[in-house]
Image: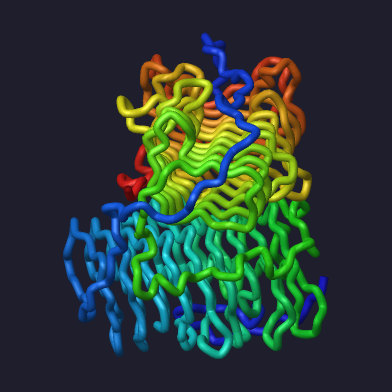
Amino acid sequence: MVTWAAKTKPQTIYMKAQLLFIAMVCIIAWSSCSKTEIKPSNQTTSLTHVNFSSTRLATVPYASYAPSSPINLTGSHDITISGKSITGGTVPAITLKNCYNVHITQNSLGNSTSIGIYLINCKNITVDYNYITNVSTGVDVENTSGGGIIVNYNQFLNMKGPAPHGQLVMFNTVSGANNSISYNKGENIAGQSTPEDAINVYKSNGTASSPITIAGNWIRGGGPSTTGGGILLGNSGGSYQVASNNILVNPGQYGMAIGGGDHISITNNSIYAAAQSFTNVGIYVWGQGVPPCTNSTISGNKVKFINKNGTENDSWVAQGEATPTGWSTNTWGANIDASILPAVVVSQAAATMPIDNTTYVVSGVINLNGSHDITISGKSINGGSVPAITLTNCYNVHITKNMLGNSSNVGIYLYNCYNITIDYNCITKVSAGVLAVDITNGGIIVNNNQFKNMVGPMPHGQFVQFDNVSGANNSISYNRGENIFGQSNPEDAVNIYKSNGTASSPIQVVGNWIRGGGPSTSGGGIMLGDNGGSYQVASNNILVNPGEYGMAIAGGDNISITNNSTYAAAQSFTNIGVYVWGQSGSPCTNTTVNGNQVKFFNKSNIENDAWVATGEATPSGWSTNTFGANINASILPTVLISF
């Protein structure tokens, strides 16, 4: 580790540094949660190629932005601002003061010496699916105490600053529950931008049960500022902030940092930087100008950060700061490079076409065998009695932005494939959303999709099912799924059956939002280790009323459930929040269940948050869970699915 002498700078409003479950164990009458082996109902060995030419236009065209002058509102509420193309000039493109219950979505904002979206003393504001470019700061939120500030799924390109501005997103004195900066994509191109930090959380406070969440962001580019970098938490204090599962490439002087505050966490992020004239350190902990950082956690991160001298300098804890919890679990000198982010982070089309709208062209079902290096996109497919899309023995396929549904079979079925990316699809009214079977070479990515109303019946009924999937780079992450009672017949939301990641690349189930389950008395939220398997991680998922159970480890080795939030009200089928039980006859080994928040009522309206079966070892981290957490159904937004 390379250390250096601390340097200080004058304190400004954005002060920075030069360097920058009580487990209620009940004997309950269990309906068996074990799953029988799920095999496809219609395996075929000789599938034919189909013609990808369109038949007729669907009824969902691209929307387009309408030119608008800057918007400046005070005291407004219960409105939506959408479809606008705004050039700010010398003022913010959108300013809200003392507003609440406002949705800012699918706008193109930019070309201002001021801010893209400026929120002052507001609450319950959702900012999503916007494209923001060439502004001082993308989204700046100030003096907000009511909570509910959601800045998710936006794209940012080339922040202009100068310091102390220059952030993609800035939280300045933001407090309360349900505040999030998540699943955004941001890029600053050298010579076209003068950014400071990508994300800065300044003097802001979440709550113990609802920390400020910075999850799943993709960030590329920073500098030449010698004080700016990637994600700065605890800037001049604050509390209850969590940054997890973000990916940063060449983000600036530093990668991620805790600059002060209490109960601040940096977990499961990936950070890479090549040497540039301003690069310094990957992760640092330093209470700059405030009391030392307290109750810090830095765990499970992968870091490779080369400083300006060409020396790897991955981490630094300032003198007098306690070593954060989980420090030994980080991978310094990780085997990563700039390819941890795709070549295209920000969609250039988003400048003229709303991010979350797609032209769907009606298509027959797609059934391919041995295909590779293709993209399936923009299709509207009704499956009928067969999968909407079937791939057998295929590889290097991207399935993106399709509308799939209305099938008694599955939405997307993969058999013996590898390197398949499934993202930004809408899947509804199918037996199961995505079913991947007998995968040996990995690379199955099911991220950023939306699922609604799986119709089963059991053993189907999942949003996503991995059945005998193994290898590296397998992920089910950042999806949204909702089953509306009476319109669906789900089993588990996510099920990992007899599947194996690797020690360096576990199967990732991260950042999913799941609402709704039942009336199955065996199905629920996220089941890992079903009938065995190994190296599986479920983290930072949010589940509301997911069914009979919330999350489970049902077998296997090296399985982890960390930093998730699970809530359920009493229903006729509800049972248990989190359980560990090797139902295939062999105990679960090397399990971790830590940092979760759970409040789960069984069908008798008794809170029943957690259970470890007789004979099972207590998982690592068990005492760090908050059973009986102060959470309710509002941990998910009212509108989860956008189609």
Residue at 45% across, 25% down: 456
Q: Residue furthest top?
A: 29
- Across and down, in percent, residue 60 comes to 29, 55
Left of 322 or right of it: where is 13?
left
- Across and down, in percent, residue 638 comes to 31, 45
Q: Is residue 152 above or below residue 521?
A: below
Left of 83 or right of it: where is 179?
right
- Residue 528 seen in the figure: no
- Residue 282 seen in the figure: yes
Left of 480 or right of it: where is 419?
right
- Across and down, in percent, residue 74 comes to 18, 70
Color theme of the render: rainbow
Residue at 56% across, 46% down: 49
Judging depth in this view, the residue of 480 and 270 nearest the camera is 480
Q: Is residue 624 above or below residue 600?
A: below
Judging depth in this view, the residue of 339 and 575 nearest the camera is 339
Judging depth in this view, the residue of 374 and 18 nearest the camera is 374
Image quadrant occupied by the N terminus: bottom right
Residue at 32% across, 48% down: 643
- Across and down, in percent, residue 87 comes to 29, 83
Residue at 69% across, 34% down: 438
How many callouts does the rendering have? 0
Judging depth in this view, the residue of 471 and 420 nearest the camera is 420
